[in-house]
Image: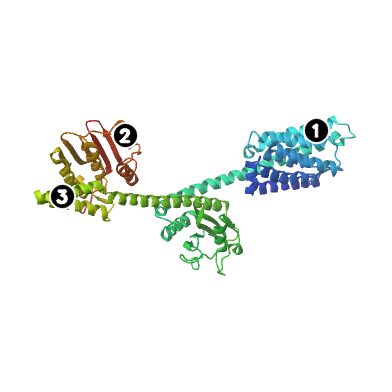
């Protein structure tokens, strides 16, 4: 082997290495290798590896007066990457070239087609990334041995290389080394990207965990500034920018003298990202499009932030050197943008939930039954002549209920205030029941100062009176009890000795499928405010009564 032959081998392997590197760095091509059986992917892989295979007929190895092609590398790699269909067509392209241009004997082109198809069969069982360099080299070695045997079986006039065993061994060695090198570079870059991805994912999760409390309050200037500071601190970039659709919300780092929060967006790259809804990687100042002539930022990655399908802003991570955006920066920016988009959507959902709960609470406050109001007025009118003091007291209780229904009270009040409204309601109710209704209230001092959601007890009392006690014949008892359990949980029970709730109806109530809004609203509000450990439970033993039990975290109003 001469020095010239050695240089040609190095040149051929260098070309293979460069092609493998560019292939692994191309997201489009690697996406095609992951989904090789789509027509677009097959066509792209056939074009790429067909070019590599035909180029192998020119990237030849000089041996005496002969030139040994390396086209088998591209053919086999097409099978590994795209399966038997890609391997067959790349082999066919190479075979046509060998017959038409090189005037090769027909058995050799046919062998090339078969080699591409056979290597593609391995792709049916393994992914491209799972085919190791050793496996690929072994396949090439076996196929090259088959070619040597084929050449030995052919007449010398058809295959003059059959008598040159050393030349065939050289071709086999270079093809084996080329495939091994190609797969090694692919696997190495994939592993490197996995490491970048893992680091980016960890950083993105750290950033997301620290920004979650602020972004849950909404996507605004305050939360954007805090988020940008956190990203700048953890990502170690030269600048971080967060924008809305039309103006900049936050900017931290180099260039903050002219990229100021509250001003319109200056960067052309950011505007294009919003318009196209796609990530952009900028490697020079011209592509960034900053109109400020001395902007220190030269390269950046800009990723859109979404709320559903709508772009609501961008996040940009910038560097002061050109082409300085690394794979880690790209993975990190993409991961952060995805997590921030999810958090922004959760904040919007949370805000919608709070608005819905406020609307339901207002509806519940305003839900004064017309029949109840009509009956109460009639009762007051009847007492005006017979018992004016009683009529005055009932009128005061009705005023209390009306004020509670139509005024804007706080959402969280003390149990003592909640009970005051309930006692006003019960005074009116007792005028309907007469002597049949007895009420027992047992609330300890700590429980009376505890904070509870407004209107969390009145629906339960109304339900006990209207559905449990009113249909009952004979004496009726309604008991309200509240105490603190284990110094951290407030327990409130409302029990009656009424007719009870039938099992089918009770199952609907426990499943949140009851027709009445009161019980379901109370339970859902408690879960929303305090979590699934707390809430409302209802038990019943018809016809001996029903008990509603509220479990709430114990929080005291220290001002009382």
Q: Which residue is mark 2?
A: 505
Depth check: give the residue in front, 513 or 199: 513
Query: Please, what secondary structure does the residue beneath circle 1 have?
Result: helix
Give the number of the disc on residue 380. Answer: 3
Residue at 67%, 47% (x, y): give it. 23
Residue 358 at x, y percent in the picture: 33, 51
Mark 1 to mark 3 CA distance (whole Å): 113 Å
Residue 364 at x, y percent in the picture: 29, 48
Crowdedness near tag 1: few (<14), some (14–19) or many (≥20) residues, C-alpha within 10 Å: some
Q: Are marks 1 and 2 in contact (CB under 8 Å)?
A: no
Query: Please, what secondary structure does the residue beneath circle 3 have?
Result: helix
Crowdedness near tag 2: few (<14), some (14–19) or many (≥20) residues, C-alpha within 10 Å: few
438 lies left or right of 538: left
Task: Classify residue 532 by image quadrant.
Answer: top left
In the image, which is nearer the foreground, mark 1 or mark 2? 2
Query: Please, what secondary structure does the residue beneath circle 2 have?
Result: helix
Give the number of the disc on residue 148. Answer: 1
Residue 189 at x, y percent in the picture: 62, 45
Q: Earlier in the sequence, mark 1 or mark 2?
A: 1
20 lies left or right of 378: right
Mark 2 to mark 3 CA distance (whole Å): 35 Å
């Amino acid at each position: 082997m001469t020095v010239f032959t050695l240089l040609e081998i190095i040149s051929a392997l260098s070309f293979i290495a460069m092609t493998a590197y560019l292939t692994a760095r191309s997201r489009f091509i690697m996406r095609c290798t992951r989904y090789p059986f789509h027509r677009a992917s097959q066509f792209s892989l056939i074009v790429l590896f067909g070019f590599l295979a035909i180029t192998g007929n020119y990237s030849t190895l000089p041996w005496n007066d002969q030139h040994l092609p390396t086209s088998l590398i591209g053919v086999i790699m097409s099978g590994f990457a795209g399966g038997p269909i890609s391997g067959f067509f790349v082999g066919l392209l190479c075979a046509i070239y060998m017959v038409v241009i090189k005037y090769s004997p027909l058995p050799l082109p046919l062998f090339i087609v078969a080699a591409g198809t056979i290597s593609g069969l391995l792709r049916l069982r393994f992914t491209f990334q799972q085919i190791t360099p050793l496996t690929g080299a072994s396949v090439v070695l076996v196929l090259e041995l088959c070619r040597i045997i084929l050449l030995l079986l052919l007449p010398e006039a058809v295959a003059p290389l059959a008598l040159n065993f050393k030349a065939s061994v050289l071709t086999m060695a270079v093809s084996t080394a080329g495939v091994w090198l190609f797969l090694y570079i692919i696997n190495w870059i994939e592993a490197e990207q996995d490491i970048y991805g893992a680091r980016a994912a960890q950083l993105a999760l750290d950033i997301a965990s620290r920004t979650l409390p602020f972004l849950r309050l909404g996507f605004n200037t305050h939360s954007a500034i805090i988020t940008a500071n956190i990203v700048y601190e953890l990502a170690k970039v030269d600048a971080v920018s967060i924008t809305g659709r039309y103006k900049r919300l936050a900017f931290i780092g180099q260039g903050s003298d002219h990229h100021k929060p509250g001003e319109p967006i200056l960067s052309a790259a950011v505007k294009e990202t919003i318009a196209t809804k796609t990530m952009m990687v900028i490697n020079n100042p011209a592509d960034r499009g900053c109109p400020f002539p001395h902007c220190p930022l030269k390269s950046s990655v800009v990723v859109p932030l979404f709320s559903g399908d709508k772009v609501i802003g961008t996040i940009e991570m910038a560097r002061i050197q050109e082409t300085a955006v690394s794979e880690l920066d790209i993975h990190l920016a993409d991961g952060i943008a995805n997590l921030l988009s999810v958090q922004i959507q959760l904040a919007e959902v949370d805000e919608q939930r709070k608005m819905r709960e406020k609307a339901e609470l207002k509806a519940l406050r305003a839900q004064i039954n017309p029949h109840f109001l009509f009956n109460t007025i009639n009762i007051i009118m009847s007492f005006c002549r017979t018992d004016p003091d009683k009529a005055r007291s009932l009128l005061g209780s009705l005023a209390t209920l009306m004020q509670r229904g139509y005024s804007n009270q706080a959402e969280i009040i003390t149990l003592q205030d909640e009970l005051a409204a309930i006692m006003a309601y019960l005074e009116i109710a007792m005028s309907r029941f007469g002597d049949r209704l007895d009420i027992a209230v047992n609330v300890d001092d700590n429980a009376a100062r505890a904070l509870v959601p407004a209107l969390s007890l009145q629906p339960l009392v109304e339900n006990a009176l209207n559905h449990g006690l009113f249909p009952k014949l004979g004496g009726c008892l309604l008991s309200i009890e509240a105490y603190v359990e284990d110094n951290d949980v407030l327990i409130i029970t409302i029990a009656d000795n009424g007719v009870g709730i039938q099992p089918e109806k009770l199952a609907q109530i426990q499943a949140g499928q009851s027709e009445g809004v009161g019980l379901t609203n109370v339970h859902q509000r408690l879960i929303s405010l305090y979590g699934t450990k707390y809430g409302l439970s209802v038990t019943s033993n018809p016809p001996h009564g029903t008990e509603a039990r509220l479990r709430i975290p114990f929080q005291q109003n220290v001002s009382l």
